[in-house]
Structure formats: C-alpha cells, structure tokens
Amino acid sequence: MKYLLGIDFGGGASKATLLREDGVIVCETSAEYPTHHPTPDASEQSPADWIDVLCRSTKELFAESGVSPSDILAVAVDSATHTAVLCDENFVPLRPAIHWTDARSRAEAKYLDAEYGGEIFQKTFHRPDTIWTLPQLLWLKNHEPDVHGRIKHIFFEKDYIRRFLTGSYETDFIEAEGSMLFDCVKTAWDAHLVSLSGLSADVLPPIVDPKDIVGKVTPDASEATGLAEGTPVICGTTDTVMEVFAAGAVRERDVTVKLATAGRICVITGKPYPDRHLVTYSHIEKGLWYPGTATKAAASSYRWYRDTFCSDGSGSMRGDYRELNKGAASVPIGCEGLIFHPYLNGELTPYADPMLCGSFTGIRATHTKAHFTRAVLEGVSLSLLDSKLYLDGLGIPYNRRAVLIGGGAKGELWRQITADALGMELVTTESSDSSLGSAMLAGIAVGVFESPTDAVKKCVREKSVTLPDPANTERYAEIFKTYKQIHDALAPIYRER
C-alpha cells in the first residue's frame, strides 16, 4: 500500500492526516501553536512556530503509524486564508504574520472602501475589511514603513510552509482570491489593486492550480521532517475549501456548517454570490463556488474561555473540554437568561463590524461556571443562526441536511445545540479536517483518484446524525430575538470607544 499526506495549518493548530490509497485514514497527529496579541486588536503568528510544528508532527506521524516515508506518494499543505508572510530579498520574514482576525487596519479598510470600494468589489467580489491582505499591507505602510519598504516577496501561510519543503515560490488561484489583490473576473493579479497597497505586483508569487505538483522534498527538509527526499509536493490551497471537500461537498446545494477557529456556513453553488457579508471563493471542482458566511470567533471563543477562566495560572487546565461540556449539559436551554456574544475580534456576517466586542449579558448571582460554559456554546450557535438567516434572505438554495465540520463538531452537546439553533439535520463524517481534504487533493494530483467526486466516494464516510428538536428550535428562536436586541443596543456603544 502507498499513502498520501495532508497537513493543515488552522487558526491555532496544525493537523496531519495520513491517508491510504484505498481511502482509509491510517493516522492523525495534531499540535497547537500560539497567536500573539501585542495590542488588544492585534493577532499575529510566528512563521517559525509553523515550521517547528511541521517538523515535529511529521516525525510523530511516521513514528505512530509505522509507515515508511518512502511509501508517501505525495504531500499537500493547506492553511488559513489571508495570512500573509512578508519577506526580504532572501525570503526571510520581516515580522510576524498578520492573522486574518487582526483588526488594526480598520481605518485603512474604511479609506479603501470610501475611495475605491466599487472597483474593489467588482474585481474581488468583496468589500474592504480588516481580514483582507490589501488593507493590512496599507496599514503596514502607514504604521511600519521600514518593514513595508523592505518587502520583496509576499507568501501566504501554506506557501511559506511549502517553500520550506521544496524551495519553490508560488500560490494557487483560490488563495489569490483571498488577498484582495487579485481580479476574480480576469483571474490574475491586478496591478492597480496592488498599487493601492504601496507595492508592485513583482512581490507576488506566480499562480498555479491547487493540484499542480510544484516541487519535491529537498534534502534539508527531509532531514528536518522525516519525509523522504524527492517526495512530490503539490501546491495545495486554503483550509476552508479543503474542509468543504473533505466533508464531501462537491455538488450544488451541498452545505457545510463549521465550528472551528471561525464559524462558517458554506453552500456549493454554480456561480459566485458577491455580497458585503459573504466570503465567496472558487471550489476545486471546476465551475463551482462556495460562498459562505463567517463568524470570526467560534471554537476559538471556547478555547479563549477555557484558557482564560479554566486555568490555574501556570498553564494547566482545571478540567478539559469534556468536563466543561458535562457541566454545561446540566444547564437548561437559555442558561437562565445568560447570553454570550462571540465578538472577540469584531464580527463579519451579517455585520462586517470590527468594532463589536464579545460580552456576557444577563448575569445573575445564581449563575455558575456551567452556565457560563453553556452560554459560550449557545452564543456561537446563535451567531451561526444569525448567518443562516442572512443566507435565507439572499435566496441561495441549499439542502437542509448539512455536514458539521471543525473541532467543535466533536462535542455531542455542541452538535445538539447547533442542530437545535439552526433547525437543521447535522451529519458528521469520519474526518472532515482540511488535512484530509489536502491528502485527497494530493491523491488527485498523482492519479490515485480520478476526480473530486471519485475522491469523496472513496474517502468520505458518515459517522453520526444529529436531528434538531423542534421544541428546542422554537425556544432558540425566542432567545435569538433577545440576542439580536443586545447586539443592536451595544453596537453603537462599541463604535464610540
């Protein structure tokens, strides 16, 4: 048997999946890395942390699986979109990478929207916001001109990691769509959009197909990672489309609901849906798109809650997620009036408001830690309901049976809360991690699978089904009214701060 390796770099952790050529998952490993917040609205990651995790996780994967590195047919890496690595002429990073949740470029996004919003929307299908590379680059020009002036090469996260493996320099067209420097109609870097950042297009990488083999594992990378020298490496693409692919969503009307660092509802369509409150990218299946909503802090809200309130101060946790979930399960729907809004880094759908802040409201002396835990889970699920209702308003057709993906899908309680809040049947699969999608994509690149549909047929297996309770759905609809009222009341206050 031969194998395919997919490696994902998400919002705060990396996961590697080893896939047998017959579609069976053999081994999975994962490791976390930190996100740094030098100021309250900043989110940065160190590229060195990604490389460290890459080297450790691949060696761990081979040790756990017993698979020989020489039996790996191909490797693919994916990562979170719009995370740019700015390098000098020697491909050395000039500063930490600005994560897409960073909100420092508010003024720059506002300026770009006011002066060039129409052109930008027409070319990129999106309006300027802090999540995109273009406003972030303009922020650097205004606030870190020394760094900005030394930029010679721009990588995106998975491309920087892949260069460590191969020494090559390129990106894929889906990643390019997420930069706000790319014309989605002409499918090319746009010189004028790039000039708005104060740079020229020669700092950007060549664009290839996600399935293209772009290099082979070098001797140095082989020694560092344990991968066999000469192993083919494909370009790969962004984590969300790989999750969608791994979930089996390759046909129009297929829908995924994501509970990961971010929360998303993505629908597979036959055309793009440019909209202020949607993120619209191409699918790997030619002619398809996956417009979706975006909640900035979904599972990352739960992680923030755990790390902030369930730590003894030394880094040790007072209970893990399973214990937290057990306590939350004892609390009734609605947490007896306690409501959480997951706006830890502002919010996207349906507000596009970077000034929004997270909040617990309705706190009473009778509320316990378990109430606060459940409130976090419910608040994130209600933010997804907010997004779902926005999709409904646009009239985008989708199936009422969705695949639930992301780390949050592992918890039975959160699955049920989300199914009840959305009023949708939620299916989980054996693995919907984007690293599985990347392994499947690598399989297409080297001819193991004939097409995305063939890969889904051979690799995607249903694991569980969660049905919504109609009575609970009605109850959450009532709670949601209060959830919206609280947003409407607090949003003007946040904008004045």
Image (cartoon, rainbow, N blue to C red):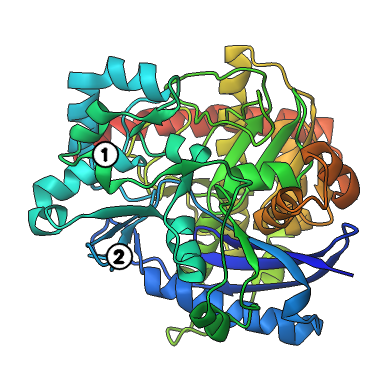
Q: Secondary structure at mark 2?
A: loop
Query: Any mark on residue 201, and which?
Result: 1
Q: The residue under label 1 is which amino acid type?
A: Ala
Q: Quadrant of the N terminus?
A: bottom right
- The residue closer to the viewer here, 12 or 22, is 22
Indicate the quadrant where residue 422 lies: top right
In the rendering, at what x and y percent does residue 191 appear? 26, 30
Cα–Cα span, label 1 and label 2: 16 Å
Give x and y (percent) for residue 349: 48, 31
- Does residue 306 appear to the left or right of 170 in the view shown? right
* 10 Å crowding of disc 2: few (<14), some (14-19), many (20+): some
For residue 194, say whether it is visible.
yes
The residue drawn where x is 60% and y is 52% is 260
Q: Which residue is mark 2?
A: 91
How many discs appear? 2
Q: Residue at x 42, y 45 (%)?
A: 343
